[in-house]
């Protein structure tokens, strides 16, 4: 997968797991003049909840396939979606750690 395609997939997954479709843009939420919208922590919490729910759905589809009641295409699609969501989550975590380290390096 090329880098632009991976970035597009990551952005697409972030929009799918965003808890509030009206506030999908981090920039719009961060620049909200009167503190409108949700906090960054609330957005991350909602994204984590949806990520966990997606993992459970993927597991359920795999169990259904093992029981002979599922479709292989559904399982592959669910696992692929979970993989992209995990990659997005790891990328966000890495950026947060990098930002924290940059802040800690600032002189007081």
Image (tube, rainbow, N blue to C red):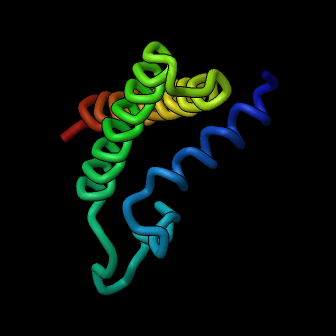
Pick out the residue farthest to the front. Answer: 68
Q: Position of residue 74 (x, y in %)?
A: 61, 31
* 14 in relation to 77, above or below: below
Side (left or right) of 5 relative to 53: right
Q: Position of residue 46 (x, y in %)?
A: 30, 53
Q: Nearer the viewer, residue 10 or 99?
A: 10
Residue 95 visible to the viewer: no
Number of residue marks: 0
Q: Quadrant of residue 56?
A: top left
**Towards the viewer: 11 or 108:** 11
Q: Where is residue 42? Give x, y as percent.
A: 25, 58
Say which quarter of the image contains residue 93: top left
Image quadrant where residue 39 sits:
bottom left
User: Residue at left 44%, top 24%?
Assistant: 64
Q: Indicate left or right for 41 with 64 as reference.
A: left
The front one of 80 and 58 is 58
Residue farthest to the left, as pictured: 108
The answer to whether one can see residue 50 in this image is yes
Q: Residue at x 28, y 45 (%)?
A: 49
Expressed as whole percent of the image width and height from the top left, the position of residue 86 reads 46, 27
Quarter of the image where the N terminus is located: top right
Q: Residue at x 52, y 53 (%)?
A: 16
Residue at image coords 52%, 64%:
25
Compared with 66, 84 (above or below) is below
Query: Which quadrant does the C terminus fall into?
Result: top left
14 and 64: which one is in front?
Answer: 64
């Amino acid at each position: 997968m090329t880098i632009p395609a991976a970035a597009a997939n990551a952005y697409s997954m972030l929009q799918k797991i965003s808890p509030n479709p009206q506030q999908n843009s981090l920039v719009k939420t961060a620049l909200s003049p009167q503190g409108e919208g949700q906090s960054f922590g609330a957005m991350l919490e909602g994204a984590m909840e949806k990520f966990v729910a997606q993992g459970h759905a993927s597991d359920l589809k795999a169990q259904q396939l093992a029981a002979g009641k599922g479709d292989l295409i559904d399982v592959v699609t669910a696992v692929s979606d979970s993989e992209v969501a995990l990659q997005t989550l790891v990328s966000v975590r890495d950026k947060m750690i990098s930002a924290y380290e940059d802040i800690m390096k600032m002189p007081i």
